[in-house]
Each structure stands twice: as structure tokens, then as C-alpha cells.
Amino acid sequence: MRVLKQLKVPRPVLSICLNTLVTHLGFYAMTAVLTVYLTQVKGMPLSVTAVVTMIFTVSYRSARFLTGPLLDNIDPFKCMWAGCFLTGVSLAMADFWQSPVLITIQLVIAGIGYSVRGLSSKASLSFVGSKDGHSLFYFANSNMYTNGAAIAGPLIGSLLLTGSLKSFTLSFVGGFYILGAILLSIFPPGCSLQGRERKPVSFWKGYQTVLLDKSFRKVLLFNMIGCFFFTQLFNSFPYLIGTYSDAPEKLGSLLMLNGILVVLFQIPIGRWMNTFLSGKREGYRLLLAFLLFGTSFSLNAIVDSIGGYYVFVALFTIAEMLFIPAIDAFVSNAAHPDLRITYFSVIGLSTALGEGIGVYTGLQLIHMWSLYGKLSYFWLSLALLSGLSLVLYVTLNRSPVHNKEEGKLWRY
């Protein structure tokens, strides 16, 4: 109880965050070495490895759409346990197959389990946060644990793949998910995370209800825009540093700085947002995030140096720490009580679309401006897009949407 008081989070939130830490250690350990594992350990040609990896990525990105309304009929905490167990067992079994087809099937099943766990954890945090009004802070906690895993996960994956038991790499990764299921059993929420009076949710009607929600459609739009900017740090930026910079060896420390800053400052920033950017000032959360995205891009256009890159990562990370929990809190507030998982499944598709467009557009802009010898214009282009997103946000923010079910006035 003393630990809970120090962390100042309810028992269900602590349980979810511990599960997030453990399972994401496994996830980041696997994604960091999956292609190397498939080629060197399983002996797959690079072309086959590319197909298997692509199918796995599509499975865990798209499975949330197929499972969303169905999971809304089940207690989300039970869904988390099932998702962890399904992922862990499927990954462990992949070690014992040599056929690319069978390995792909196991990875697809693992991807489905991964989506189930992710959606259910979001819904669980949303359920607890909707009761005490601290959903933003709880999502900030979860983001901190995720980034902590992102720092250590790749190191664990590298150790697994270079050790004497590299043939059992996925078994060890699956063990993290099994451990996550065990932790959920040891630290249950202590309460039901499913409303007592609920109507069964049908697949198509659930999505129809979500997509007809005007306020939520605005959240989808700005989430997609934010994810477009978010992916530039992890795709366009590494490509630029690795291809055009004189110090590509600095890339690891630059990206690690992002994770370290999130672990250290996500909770204080989350508390600050929960205190000073709440109520009528909720709209300033995304406004400030977009402003910081634009500022960081402008800095890279003006200061082309390693020192400038570190400042860019710091500013960008602050924007990330504002953006991610703010979106989750908006979704949590907008979600109908019976459709929490469905709402988060749809926002997941918006995230995938924003990241996909962001990767393609970013690399195309780099290619275009490199032909003219004006790479700084790439960052200016992103800064201009950030400015346009601010104008769009302010314009739409002037049109309030009344949430009849909650009796609140939402501005996005």
C-alpha cells in the first residue's frame, strides 16, 4: 500500500502499467532483431524475410479493427490476460518451426494477441480514468513505461540473438508476455472493468456509432496529423543522419535521448497538463504540441549541427509527451461507455494511416530537396505543415460539439 501511495495511482492502473512495461520489453526486443533472426537463425532469404515481417506488421496493426467491437463485450482486463497468453505461446512456438509459412502463421496469431492486449489496456485505463477524472495522468504513466521498455528492449534483443541460445530468441520474447499474464493474475484490478448494465455490441453497428460521432472524427483528424509529424523522428531523421550527416554514429544516442526524456519527464508533464491544461483549457494540449513540433522542425532548418540535433530531439520529445496522452485522454472522454475498445481500435487505424503517410511523404520530400541541394528546406516544409495544422486546429476549435451522453461541451 505504501508503494501505491508513493506512485499515486490506483491498483488497476499500476497493474496495467507493470504489464505494459513487461510486454513491451518483449515487443521491442523482438522488433529490433526480427529480420536478423529470420535470416540468420531460420535461414530465410531476404526477400522472404521482408514478406514475413510485412505480414506480421500488418497483422498487429490491422487486427485491432477486426477485434474492436467484439472485445467490447468482454471485461477488458480479462482480454489483456488472454492477449498476453496468446502472444506468448504463439511466439514461443515459432522457434520450433522451419517453414516460413508456419512461422508466419504463428507471428500473425501473435500479432492478433498483441492488438488485443494493447486495445484492452487502453480501455482499462479509460474506464478507471473516467471514474476519477485522471485519465490524462494515467495515460501519461503508461507512455512512460512504454518508453522505458523501448530503451531496454533492443538491448535485450541483441543479447538474446548474440548468445548461445539464439535459436530460442522468440521463446524468451514470448516469456515476457507470459510473465505479463502472470502479473495480471497476481495483481488483479480488484474491481470489474465492465459496466453492469451493458447491451451486446455488434460489429458493424459499433463502428457505425463511432464514425458518426462528430467530435471523435475531429480527434481522428488531428491524431493522424500528429502521427504524421511523430514518425519523422523515427524514420526521416535517422535516414538523414545516416545518409547525409558527418556523424551517423550519433544516431543511437539521439534516439535514446528521446526515450530517456520520456521516462524522466512524462509524469511531471502529465501532472502539469492535468493541473493547468484541463477543463476549458484542454484544447491547448494539442495546440502546444503542434507548436513544439513546428519549432523543432524550424530549429533543424536553421541550425545544422549535432548540438542542434540534440535540442531538436528534446523539443520534439516534449511535443510527444504532450501529444500522446492528450489524444488518449480525448478518446477516453469521447468514448461511449459500451464502446471503449471500439473507439481505441478506430484511433489505431488513424495512427497507422498518419504514420504511413508520414513515412512516405517524409522520404519523398528528402529526395526532392536533396536533388536541389537544399535539405534544410525539408525541415522548413515540415514546419510549414505544422503551421497549417495549427491554423486548422484553431479554426475547427471554434466549432464546439455537444456530447449529449456525457452532457459536456467538447472543443477540438
Image (tube, rainbow, N blue to C red):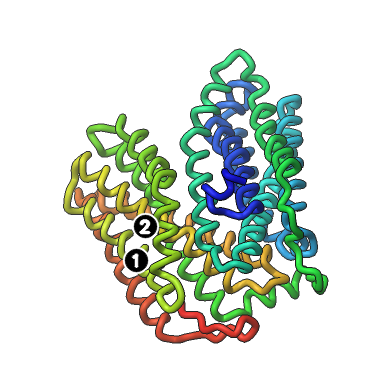
Q: Residues within 10 Å of mark 1 (few under 14, many from 20)?
A: some
- Tell me residue 359's x, y (percent): 43, 52
In this view, the residue in front, 60 or 269, is 269
Q: Which mark is residue 319?
A: 2
Disc 2 and disc 1: Cα gap in Å? 7 Å
Q: Which mark is residue 288?
A: 1
Residue at image coords 77%, 59%: 75
- Looking at the rendered structure, the secondary structure element under dot 2 is helix
Q: Amino acid at mark 1?
A: Leu
- Tell me residue 43's x, y (percent): 63, 22
In this view, the residue in front, 263 or 58, is 263
Q: Is residue 48 above or below residue 286?
A: above
Q: Which mark is residue 214?
A: none
Residue at image coords 33%, 39%: 254
Looking at the image, residue 311 sits to the left or right of residue 284; the answer is left
Check whether the beta carbons of the residues at disc 2 and disc 1 lie within 8 A of each other.
yes
